[in-house]
Image (tube, rainbow, N blue to C red):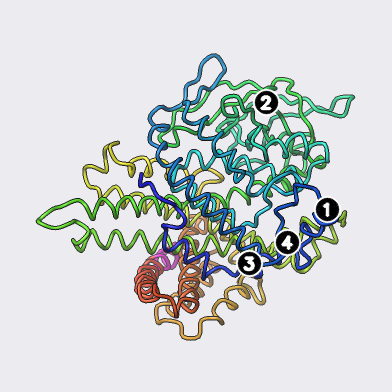
Amino acid sequence: MIANNYFTDDQDLKLFFEHLIDWTSIVNSTEGEEFFDHELYKKTNNPRYEMAPSSVEEAVELYRSSLESLGEFFGKDVSQLSSVMDRKHLRYENGTVIFPDETTSIYEKFRDTGLMPFSISREAGGLGLPGTMSAFYGMIMARADVSFCMTVALLNLAQIVSRYGTEEQIENFAAKAATGETLFAMSLTEPDFGSDLNNVRTTAVKMEDGHYRLNGTKRFISQGCGLGPYPSSLLTLARTGNGGARGLSVFLVKSEDVTIAGIETKMGIHASPTCEVVYENSYAELLGQEGLGLTRYTTGMTNFMRLGSAACGPGSGAGAYYESRKYAEERQQFGKPIAEIPAVAEMLHKIQREVNASRLLTFETARVVDMYQHHQIRLEKGNKEDREIRKDEKVKKWGNLASVLTPIAKYYCSEEGHKCANLAVQIHGGAGYTEDYDVARIFRDSRINTIYEGTSQIHVRIAVGAIVAGMTGDGNFKKYLESIKAEIESPSKFLIEQSKIFEDAIAKFRSIEEDQIKERVAENLMIITSRYLCSMLYEKALIKLKQNDQFDRWTKDCRAYLIDSTAIAKSCIYRIENAV
């Protein structure tokens, strides 16, 4: 892998930070216009709140310096070990998962930077950064190594405990994750039930002391074994009541109280353990309330991981781009670098513009999450009733929108990230099909992103219904798209054409009477929607870049992206029109 700072040396990622992110609204939504955590530090002198910013400017400077440090560590330390950790794999012996020494050492080294708990609340000793910063973190980390990125992202699931747990659970679970003493895992999937979580069979029985005992088996549990000497806390979905979603609850279980029955031998992410976990009267603590496991706590976990998965798409794509550009500029054929061959140059340009389109969608999704989530958490911590919180205008508006955008972003960015990795292998030619170059690993690792945290097909099913419903009358999604459209004073003919195709596709999709036929062509509507949204965000970005020296390149990339998207939209609506 190229060794440099993966933030400061990435021209476009820096451009996003400096020019395309509305930090004022994000900081004010995250910290509150009163900067609550800073005020709390002034009153209590609690060291956990010492880094809480007192102004937008202070927050942005904190964000910038943390990304510079993160980019340095992942670009010059993690990236140089990624192929080593991949080749050495993991071993399973007598119920124990054995990691390469490099994995443990890089974990400990990163833990010592203090950057690891980026999404964990300050209350639990974390950094309490906004979702937008989590997206930046994910992009930088995934470029260096997807396996290690997963380890860190999963650790930050501790934010769920700091949000819904008791004071004792916050200290025993979330605070220990913030210091890197423990990791976290999301233990949902079972051998017979993957995405169909309504039918989870793992059972929880309440004991006289108020705690629970769990019995069952979970499969495909990333990081369920912990990492070397560092155990995991497993957020486990189990049944406390009758069938269906309302009979499910979430529990905190320590990895030392379960049996790791084995690990999967996988195509990629070789340094990330994917475990089969057996619960045999395993000691467990209930998180929050019984019966809200699927409807509240699991939703919180999956939305966080969806955003992380979305960020991983352009993260892997950026790795594919920079590794391919370096190779293409150095590889000589026909008396010149292959980067000068038009077909190769087009593949490089396609990766670059697709990466930036995915970044636009990921950051927009993160912004929408930031506009309500921290506000909602403050209401929860203030002991507001659930009914009152649900009626809150900010929570209702942005929360509804986030429920549409997170599956769109997860779907689109994971799919396009893998396509970018595929192009990177092609640019390398025969060499790309060997393990001598990092693009082979990038390709293998990017494939999982379209599967875990819900397959692409599951996210199509989740999003399409919400898209169609949100486009009726004064629907929230319709208002949102119109608000973006209003900011683009002179839309291109390609954007205008896509807008018409999108509206026609919605109408034609609605007119299909049979549900099975709808499901068969639903992905076409998802593609039209996601590329139309990215196209609008691309043209909106150009408005902010008019005085920037990258404006001409971005204008050309935007035009090429919109031409691609319009052509793809036409093929997709053709399939919808002829579905019956």
Amino acid type at mark 2:
Gly
Local packing at callout 4 (Cα closer than 10 Å; few below 14, some 14-19, many 20+) is many
Q: Do residues under tags 1 and 2 come within 8 Å of each other at their CB atoms?
A: no
Q: Examine the image and state in which quarter residue 172 appears.
A: top right
Task: Name the quadrant of the C terminus.
Answer: bottom left
Q: Which of marks 3 and 2 precedes in the sequence?
A: 2
> How far is disc 2 from disc 3 in space, using C-alphas?
38 Å
What segment is highlighted magenta in the picture?
A: 572-580
**Looking at the rendering, which quadrant does residue 161 occupy?**
top right
Q: What x and y, as percent, mark residue 311? A: 51, 53
Is there a contact, CB below 8 Å, between mark 2 and mark 3? no
Q: Distance between the residues labelled 4 and 3?
A: 32 Å
Question: First in sequence: mark 1 or mark 2?
Answer: 2
For label 2, the residue is: 216
Name the front one of labels 1 and 2: 1
Tag 3 residue: 469
Of residue 30 and residue 294, the one placed in the foreground of this image is 30
Residue 181 higher or lower than 329, as above or below: above
Are discs 2 and 4 less than 8 Å apart at CB? no
Which residue is label 4 attached to? Answer: 31
Query: Is 491 displayed left or right of 240 in the figure?
Result: left
Measured Cα–Cα span from mark 1 to mark 4:
14 Å
Residue type, numbered disc 4? Glu
Query: What amino acid type is highlighted by mark number 3?
Result: Ala
* Mark 1 / mark 4, whichever is N-terminal: 4
To which residue does mark 1 refer? 381
Image spot of residue 286 (x, y percent): 79, 35
How many neighbours does mark 2 have within 10 angstroms: few (below 14), some (14-19), or many (20 or more)? some
